[in-house]
Every structure is written in C-alpha cells, then in structure tokens.
Amino acid sequence: MMGKNRPGLFFSSVSSGKRSLVEIIIIAVLCILLSFYMGKHRVADFMIFCITVLSYDLIYGFMGHLTIGHMLYFGTGTYTAALFMKWVTPNPILGIVAGIVAGALLALIVGKLVIRTKGATFALVNMAFNYVGFFLVAYAWGNVTGGEDGMPSFTGPLGSFYLHRHPYWFFFVLFCLLLSFYLLKHFSASPFGIMVRSIRYSERRVRFLGYNSHYYKLVTFIIASSFAAFAGTLTAINYGYIAPDYISPLRNAEIIFANLIGGIGNIYGALIGGMVYMIIRDFLSIYVERWELVLGVVLVVTALRFRTGITGYIQKYL
C-alpha cells in the first residue's frame, strides 16, 4: 500500500503568481547587474552553484536529512553530459537531458537503499556511495573518464549558434536558475512539499495518519538529485573540462556551508547562501590569502548569532 491520497507534486494555491514573477525579475536583475561587475563567466558559475545549493536544501532543509553524498549526483550529471556529447552527439541540450536522466536513475537505485536510514547513518551511507562513485571515476574507469587528470568536455553548436559562448550561455544559465527556483519553490509550497516538511518534524505521526513516508522521501530524494545532476551538466559545458574533483565527497562541505549561511529550509536562503559563499571563495580570496579563515568566522557567527541563517534573520527582524 502506498497510503492515502498523495498530494500533487508541484502546483499549489499557496504561492501567488504575481509574487513569483516579481521574485524572478528581482533575481534576474541582480544577476545581470552582478555580471557587469564580476564578469559573465564568473556569475554563471555562481548561478550553477546556487542550483546545486537549492537541490541540496530540498533534502537537508525540507526533508531534514543531512547527507554527505550529494556530489555523487552532481558528478554523475557532469560526466554523463561530457561523455554523451563526446560519443553520441555534441548537442548540449541532449547532453543536459542525458545527465539529468542518469542522475535521476542513480538516485532511484541508491535512494531505495538509503531513505530507510536516518541521522548519522543516512549521512554516512550517502558518503560511502559518493566515495564509490569517486573511486570509479578517478581510478577504475580511468580509461574512459580520464582518471585523475580529467578530460575535456566538447560542446558542439546548437543550430546556427554556439550555446556555450557568451552572452548566450550566461542568459541560458540564468534561465536555468530561474526555472529551478520556480519549480522548487512551488514544489516546497505544494501539498506534497508540506507533507515532506511534516516528515521532517515527525515522521511517526505522518505514518500514523496512513501516509507512506518512504514514498515521499524517495520522490524528494530523486528530485533533489536530478537538480544536482542538472547543475553538473551545466558545469561540464561551462568549463569545457571535467575532473574527479566534481564528484569528490569533500566538496559536499561547500554546499552544506552555503545552506547554513543562507538558512536551511528556505528557498531564498539557498540562493543567498550560495551567492555569499561563492563571493567569499572566488572574490574575497583575491584579496585575502587565507580566505578559509574568513569563511570559518562567518560560519561561527552564523551558528551563534544567526541560527536560522541570513534569510531567517531578515524575515524575523525586518
């Protein structure tokens, strides 16, 4: 039995269409203005990272499960897109679709095993799978993936123009960010998303009411992993080169830090945290040699003074 009637996945009367449109316009304007100051390529990198943070917040913030294996799906999308464009067709759109499908299928397989675990077990089991993926890419399948040296990611033309060249690429990534924001916002506000948040607070009560909590967690896990794979495919095209670093379990810390800074369980916090983290890492590091120290101070202040992150503090006091 799958439980009682399942709430719809994406659309809900909770969110206002006009408010969503205003938010999308504000995000687009801010990204465009930021590109004049930092450059289109760097801001495109920022936006891709924000998509990754948004996907992670769906598991950590809304479902309440800390995972240290999210980069497995990001890396799956990266390598699948690059290999697909190399062996099948250089069409970037088809490469992106292939990467998303690969990430979703892997999440379906792994998710069936990990969603029945909780707490530290959930985090560590996901990390173990992430390490398996890293070992396969870096060593076992080195002849195909380029091993530790990585491999170039060739992107061909899309029709009469090259999508991966600016300014086309910048606006395409901006569209991907806005689309991800819109879909995940409506997902989190939908009856299905509310049920996922209910599981975070008390899974026992949800199951007592007759709902299949494993179903909701599995679907959420697959959706979040698919968006992570989506960000991975964009990374493969954005840099034109892929390496095992994109699937390294150690890089999960970046996503976790960004979520903590912006505020977990908050769709706006994921965007703000992603941007703040990338500015600290890529911009502040130009002027401060030990930028990790600044990041550590920011995390300590956030944990002690802003426990709900930057967004939570703004919503509470302003």
Image (cartoon, helix red, strand yellow):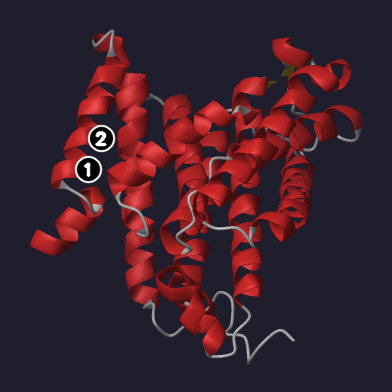
Q: Amino acid at mark 2?
A: Leu
Q: Position of residue 233 (x, y in %)?
A: 67, 38
CA separation in Å, label 1 and label 2: 6 Å
Helix, strand or loop under label 1 = helix
Q: Is residue 315 visible?
A: yes
**Marks 1 and 2 in Cβ contact (< 8 Å):** yes
Choose between 239 and 28: the one closer to the eye. Answer: 239
Q: Answer yes or no: is residue 318 visible.
A: no
- Circle 2 residue: 299
Task: Residue at 42%, 32% (x, y): give it.
Answer: 43
Q: Nearer the viewer, residue 169 or 65?
A: 65
| Mark 2 nearby-residue class (10 Å; few <14, some 14–19, many ≥20) | some
Q: Residue extending furthest right?
A: 88
The crowd level at tag 1 (other Cα within 10 Å; few <14, some 14-19, many 20+) is: some
Which residue is at 24% across, 54% downward? 308
Number of marks present in the image shown = 2
Looking at the figure, which quarter contains the N terminus?
A: bottom right
Q: Nearer the viewer, residue 72 or 156?
A: 72
Asked which secondary structure carries label 2, the reply is helix
Disc 1 target residue: 303
- Residue drawn where x is 54% and y is 46% of the image: 123
Q: Amino acid at mark 1?
A: Ala
Residue 15 lies, with reference to residue 262, above or below; the image says below
Disc sitting over residue 167 in the figure: none
- x and y percent of residue 168 in the render? 57, 36
Query: Could you say which quadrant of the image residue 154 lies in?
Result: top right
Q: At which x and y percent is residue 73?
A: 66, 42
Residue at position x 74%, y 28% in the image: 155
